[in-house]
Image: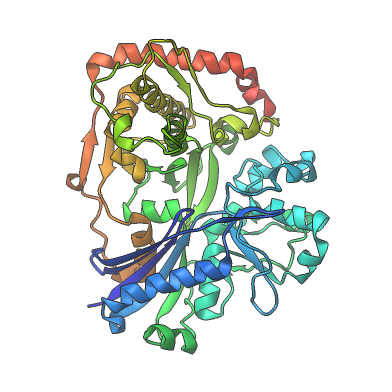
């Protein structure tokens, strides 16, 4: 039997799974990811601690599997987060997660206005946001030039683990795309942007598709009891690895639901890129294809916010209390799902109205309102924003015939039903375990790893209730009208793309 290991480094957890060539997960280990406040940086992750926990997960998995059967290791991780290393390969600063950087507001002033907007999107497929790697370089260039001078290479989280395992410095293309330093059409680091940021010569080589992968160092092979010919690769952006595990095809959509929620899909050919830009749909490259992505950073975050808002004696209310079947449908309350910011489809277009301008909240509360009215409103608000995204995709010429949902949010039946009812679409809920880590393992296995994970029989279908269609259409139009009044710049977004 051959086994392949998948390592998934997330914002909240570290997971390692072992899978056979049929895509069956035979063992999984998990550790909590810990972040701590670091003055000047934000809530950060220690690179050394991240490695130690990854190694502990790996040792746990290998203790219950046949280590000699392991043929490859694939690594996937949260995007944007990374660590600068010196010539000796040692980290120079902590890892800053995508949503936790204290220097974000400062970089807004450092990024030239002339380089934002269409020109930036045309090269990178991205709409400006402080989370991207280019902004960390700009921050260091102005505020800590000594550290920038010491930096030999910037590594994404996946790259850092690859370096620990193999001693090689390589970056996978989909992670390179999330730096805002990579030209997705020329498929190389962009000269103008790397020069602007002081990143020239400080970025790893982007691995070519199909090239030989590095093997474990002798020390690492000995430490974990693995063969010295075990090859290691970075699988890519975590959402994309999950899409690969789900065997996502062009015209299909993966709705990955966690603290933040994304809609993502693949393209063999680009539609009108100017139209994609106007709709706020971002682009990148993965496994030789283009991918598109839309995000909703306040999806799961909204549920967590409500749990805390309704807390009793400082303890968030249990999830079960927000899933009561007896409730008003549609809710009389309206919710704007922006407590953790808004997605790129609302905040892009180079118009200067970034996430900080969007605020979430509950509207139309009264003395008669109950916690379940608020909970149902939160689900409906998330669903309304989902419908906005799906309509934008259609307008941009991107198909969404089948929507596959994965992640923690799929465990909330009221949220999933609200999404189906308000969008008027069916959602397929995947019950695949550890899809992200499995996708990384599948990339490590290559053609030897058979993936039979696309059968609809393995998924639960959530369909819209016809009886609620008219009521929800009215609520959706009210939602749109409220946002147009509160954020009038949205109506002018198309004119900001010159």
Relative to 210, is 392 above or below?
Answer: above
Which quarter of the rendered picture does the C terminus lie within? Answer: top right
How many numbered marks have been drawn onto this rendered protein structure? 0
Residue at (52, 13) in percent of width and height: 481
Where is residue 375 shown, x and y percent of the image?
Answer: 37, 26
- Please tell me in which quadrant of the rendered image residue 311 appears: top left
Where is residue 13 shown, x and y percent of the image?
Answer: 43, 57
User: Outermost residue toward the left?
Assistant: 457
Where is residue 457 shown, x and y percent of the image?
Answer: 17, 45
- Please tell me in which quadrant of the rendered image residue 1 appears: bottom left
Q: Nearer the viewer, residue 61 or 486?
A: 61
Q: Left or right: 15 with respect to 86?
A: left
Residue at (28, 28) in percent of width and height: 417
Q: Is residue 425 visible?
A: no
Where is residue 427 shown, x and y percent of the image?
Answer: 29, 35
Q: Nearer the viewer, residue 321 or 16?
A: 321
Picture colour scheme? rainbow
Q: Left or right: 68 with respect to 79?
A: left
Residue at (44, 69) in percent of width and height: 54
Q: Left or right: 181 with respect to 280?
A: right
Q: Is residue 427 visible?
A: yes
Relative to 472, is 281 above or below?
Answer: below
Q: Nearer the viewer, residue 271 or 385?
A: 385
């Amino acid at each position: 039997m051959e086994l392949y290991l998948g390592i998934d480094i997330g914002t909240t957890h570290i997971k390692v799974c072992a899978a056979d060539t049929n895509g069956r997960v035979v063992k999984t280990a998990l550790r909590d990811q810990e972040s701590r406040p670091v003055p000047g940086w934000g809530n950060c992750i220690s690179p050394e601690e991240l490695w130690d926990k990854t190694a502990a997960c790996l040792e746990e998995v290998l203790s219950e599997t046949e280590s000699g059967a392991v043929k490859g290791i694939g690594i996937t991780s949260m995007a944007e987060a990374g660590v600068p290393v010196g010539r000796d390969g040692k980290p120079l600063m902590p890892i800053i997660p995508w949503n936790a950087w204290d220097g974000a507001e400062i970089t807004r002033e450092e990024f030239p206005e002339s380089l934002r907007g269409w020109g930036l999107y045309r090269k990178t497929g991205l709409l400006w946001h402080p989370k991207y790697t280019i902004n960390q370089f700009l921050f260091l260039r102005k505020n800590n030039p000594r550290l920038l001078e010491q930096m030999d290479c910037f590594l994404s989280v996946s790259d850092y683990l690859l370096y620990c395992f193999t001693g090689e410095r390589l970056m996978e293309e989909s992670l390179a795309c999330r730096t805002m330093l990579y030209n997705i059409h020329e498929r190389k680091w962009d000269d103008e942007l790397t020069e602007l940021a002081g990143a020239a010569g400080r970025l790893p080589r982007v691995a070519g598709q199909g090239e030989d992968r590095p093997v474990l160092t002798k020390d690492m092979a000995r430490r974990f009891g693995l063969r010295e010919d075990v090859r290691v690769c970075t699988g890519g952006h975590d959402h994309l690895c999950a899409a690969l595990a789900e065997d996502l095809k062009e015209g299909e959509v993966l709705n990955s639901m966690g603290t933040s929620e994304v809609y993502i899909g693949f393209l063999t050919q680009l539609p009108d890129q100017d139209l994609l830009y106007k709709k706020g749909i971002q682009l990148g490259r993965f496994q030789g294809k283009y991918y598109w992505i839309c995000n909703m950073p306040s999806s799961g975050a909204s549920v967590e916010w409500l749990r805390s808002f309704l807390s009793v004696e400082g303890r968030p209310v249990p999830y079960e209390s927000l899933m009561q079947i007896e409730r008003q449908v549609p809710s009389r309350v309206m919710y704007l799902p922006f407590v953790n910011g808004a997605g790129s489809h609302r905040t892009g277009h180079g118009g200067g109205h970034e996430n900080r301008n969007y605020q979430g909240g509950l509207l139309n509360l009264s003395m008669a309102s109950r916690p379940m009215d608020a909970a149902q409103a939160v689900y409906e608000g998330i669903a309304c924003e989902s419908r906005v995204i799906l309509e934008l995709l259609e307008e941009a010429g991107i198909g969404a015939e089948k929507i596959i949902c994965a992640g923690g949010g799929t465990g909330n039946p009221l949220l999933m039903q609200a999404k189906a009812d308000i969008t008027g679409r069916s959602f397929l809920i995947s019950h695949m375990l550890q899809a992200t880590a499995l996708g990384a393992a599948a990339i490590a296995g290559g053609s030897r790893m058979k993936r039979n994970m696309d059968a609809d029989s393995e998924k639960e279908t959530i369909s819209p209730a016809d009886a609620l269609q008219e009521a929800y259409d009215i609520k959706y139009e009210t939602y749109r009208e409220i946002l147009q009044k509160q954020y009038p710049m949205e109506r002018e977004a198309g004119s900001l793309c010159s």
